[in-house]
Image: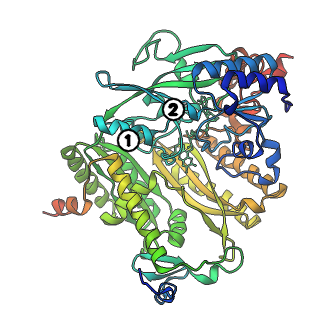
């Protein structure tokens, strides 16, 4: 997290991902802002909060795996076995 | 037949339950008037209960039902309130019996691999305790964090991993059940609490599951437990067309892999929907038109062996593995898939707040392609009529390990704040049409939620035929004064016939 308010409130420049989505942080997507002008408008988020939301979700999903089983098997590993 | 509840009734209820457990406040009642399924918010007042009670034991539930039966007051049981067929929505006022306080774990029987719990507990909380014994209660709906055991019994629910472990009806062994008259019975296979198979007498357990609270209230249940899985495998694959994905899911489900817990087919509309908003699918190339995933649970050596077999089958059907990150992330999200704020799009593409509705049916494998086209035609009609509706695509989930039939769901976004009588009427008509398609293809109107909402319920007598007449007879016999959840499943007819 950056100390200065302004730094946190200036997100990295957007790159277009598709017709309806843009991206500013790796693996993080936002609705194309033009599509959020009439009924639901976009909110301004500090960068740390955007990243916190994404990481919290990832933490939750990791917890969900641990909740159901001790270990998750990797499909990439199994594919590798098949190719051998 | 809304009942005005006067002070003497309140006094009596307070004596039974203690003053803090009889709620009459507007917020307490408003919160228990609806469920997450689309709700005619413009007619909220018509669904308000007169009061809410929070019993703590079977005896208290029995006393409440005796009083209600004596005074002919409607009673609606409510647990997590996540049901999607309006089961816990009061249609005639009266008393909501919220069973969440009956949530103790009474016994964990390690020798017989069972546990006995109050029906106000949910599987997530129960499994946190069972994990200490390396056990799991594997009833796993997509509402896993918030639906409760009593609601699973009231709906006879469906589980994501049911192809391996069975669904609620297989996992609940027996339960204490309070009849509408207040009499308490114990239902299971035979009389045993922990018996998994009996041939003694009628099989009442099935009758008292899935009745949507129209036959009484389950208060304490004994559940079947399994070893907590050592390993999980949940591959997701992409396909270039629906037909290949359809053939692949059929082959995976029919493979007979012992650790196979379920497979899901995503159609083209679902992929298009995910491309708008889901970080896993936004970056996928446009050649991805359909998806399949599978889940396996068990000991690591078994899961690895079964997993390799399924990977080989998928590859032979033209699948591209989407990688560990998407596979793991998306499967974990299935357990609470929709517990996130949702938004849809108007026809011009603008974002609007929408609630999610899932229309579910049980359809045989061979019927899936045709039902999909017919259902999307109906959703498309809704979409053309109004911006209130949005087609969010379809999933088909295996119901069992042999791949005979699938929980087939179409997800429709609804802009509730814009619902008016015209839009509601269009929605109810669409629901009726969706149900008619299921029946025309030899399916059942619902695989998991039940079928007592406006629209679909009109076709239940057609689906059940002579069985529906038996339902009316049973309802009249068990609930002579029609106090339990009146207005549901068109069962009020049972009393009209009598008079
Ligand atoms: C995001 C989401 C995902 C979902 N995914 C699934 C899924 O994968 N599988 C599935 O099966 N369902 C699913 N559902 C629907 C719902 O979660 C289930 O129907 C669940 O079984 C309802 O449980 P509940 O505790 O919320 O019950 P409630 O909604 O409170 O009640 C459901 C019905 O049971 C009756 N009832 C409640 N308690 C009792 C009792 N103690 N005795 C007798 N009757 C009672 C009620 O009157 C009502 O008719 C989903 C819902 C949501 C919101």
Q: Secondary structure at mark 1?
A: helix
Measure the C-alpha gap from mark 1 to mark 2: 14 Å
> Subunit of mark 2?
B
Inspect this view and state whether residue B440 appears: yes
Q: Position of residue B228 (x, y in %)?
A: 30, 39
Task: Check disc 1: other Cα within 10 Å, few if <14, some if 14-19, many if 20+.
Answer: some
The disc, 1 or 2, on the residue closer to the chain's N-terminal end is: 2
Q: Choose top left, top right, bottom left or bottom right for residue B325.
A: bottom left
Q: Residue at x 77, y 53 (%)?
A: B41
Q: Residue at x 46, y 62 (%)?
A: B242
- Identify the colour scheme used: rainbow
Q: Are marks 1 and 2 in contact (CB under 8 Å)?
A: no
Is A58 in front, or is A77? A58
Pointer 2: what residue?
A: B103
Is B57 in front, or is A67? B57
The quadrant the C terminus of chain B occupies is top right
Q: Position of residue B331 (x, y in %)?
A: 39, 56
Taking the image as shown, residue B85 lies to the left or right of residue B244, namely right
Taking the image as shown, residue B429 lies to the left or right of residue B330, namely right
Q: Position of residue B191 (x, y in %)?
A: 47, 11
Query: From the Cβ of disc 1, is ligand 1 less than 8 Å away?
Result: no
Pointer 1: what residue?
A: B128
Q: Position of residue B70 (x, y in %)?
A: 78, 16
Farthest residue to the left: give it: A84
> Subunit of mark 1?
B
Say above or below: B48 vs A44: above
Q: Choose top left, top right, bottom left or bottom right for residue B212.
A: top right
Inspect this view and state whether residue B286 appears: no
Residue B94 is labelled as: none
Please check whether the numbered discs 1 and 2 fall on a single chain.
yes
């Amino acid at each position: 997290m950056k100390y200065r308010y302004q730094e946190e409130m200036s997100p990295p420049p957007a790159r277009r991902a598709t017709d309806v989505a843009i991206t500013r942080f790796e693996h993080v997507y936002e609705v194309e802002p033009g599509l959020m002008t009439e009924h639901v408008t976009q909110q301004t988020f500090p960068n740390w909060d955007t990243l916190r939301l994404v990481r919290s979700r990832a933490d939750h999903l990791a917890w969900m795996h641990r909740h159901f089983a001790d270990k998750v098997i990797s499909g990439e590993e199994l594919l590798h076995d098949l190719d051998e | 037949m809304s009942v005005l509840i006067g002070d003497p009734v309140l006094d009596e209820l307070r004596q039974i339950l203690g003053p803090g457990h009889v709620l009459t406040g507007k917020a307490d009642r408003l919160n228990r008037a609806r469920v997450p399924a689309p709700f005619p918010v413009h007619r909220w007042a018509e669904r308000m209960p007169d009061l809410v009670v929070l019993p703590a034991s079977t005896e208290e539930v029995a006393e409440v039902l005796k009083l209600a039966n004596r005074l002919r007051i409607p009673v609606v049981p409510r647990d997590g309130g996540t049901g999607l067929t309006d089961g816990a929505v009061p249609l005639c006022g009266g008393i909501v019996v919220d069973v969440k306080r009956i949530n103790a774990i009474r016994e964990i029987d390690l020798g017989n691999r069972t546990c006995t719990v109050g029906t106000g507990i949910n599987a997530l909380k129960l499994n946190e305790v069972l994990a200490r014994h390396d056990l799991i209660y594997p009833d796993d709906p997509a509402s896993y964090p918030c639906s409760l055991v009593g609601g699973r019994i009231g709906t006879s629910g469906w589980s994501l991993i049911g192809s391996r472990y069975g669904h609620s009806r297989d996992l609940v062994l027996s339960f204490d059940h309070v009849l509408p008259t207040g009499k308490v019975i114990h239902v299971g296979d035979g009389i045993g609490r922990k018996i998994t198979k009996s041939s003694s007498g009628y099989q009442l357990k099935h009758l008292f599951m899935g009745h949507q609270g129209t036959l009484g209230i389950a208060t304490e249940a004994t559940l079947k437990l399994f070893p907590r899985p050592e390993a999980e495998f949940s591959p997701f694959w992409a396909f270039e067309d629906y037909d290949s994905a359809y053939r692949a899911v059929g082959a995976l489900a029919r493979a007979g892999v012992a650790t196979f817990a379920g497979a899901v087919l995503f159609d083209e509309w679902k992929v298009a929907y995910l491309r708008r908003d889901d970080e896993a699918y936004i970056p996928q190339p446009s050649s991805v038109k359909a998806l399949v995933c599978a889940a396996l649970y068990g000991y690591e050596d078994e899961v690895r062996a079964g997993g390799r077999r399924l990977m080989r089958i998928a590859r032979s059907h033209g699948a591209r593995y989407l990688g560990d990150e998407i596979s793991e992330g998306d499967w974990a999200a299935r357990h609470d898939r929709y517990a996130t704020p949702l938004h849809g799009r108007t026809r011009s593409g603008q974002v609007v707040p929408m609630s999610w509705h899932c229309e579910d049916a049980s359809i045989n494998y061979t019927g899936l392609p045709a039902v999909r086209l017919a259902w999307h035609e109906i959703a498309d009609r809704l979409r053309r009529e109004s911006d209130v509706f949005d087609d969010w695509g379809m999933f088909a989930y295996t119901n069992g390990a042999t791949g005979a039939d699938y929980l087939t769901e179409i997800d429709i976004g609804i802009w509730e704040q814009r619902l008016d009588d015209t839009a509601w009427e269009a929605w109810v008509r669409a629901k009726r049409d969706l149900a008619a398609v299921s029946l025309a293809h030899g399916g059942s109107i619902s695989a998991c939620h039940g079928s007592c909402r406006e629209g679909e319920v009109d076709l239940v007598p057609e689906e059940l035929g002579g069985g529906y007449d038996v339902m009316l007879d049973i309802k009249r016999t068990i609930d002579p004064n029609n106090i339990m959840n009146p207005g549901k499943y068109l069962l009020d007819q049972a009393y009209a016939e009598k008079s």
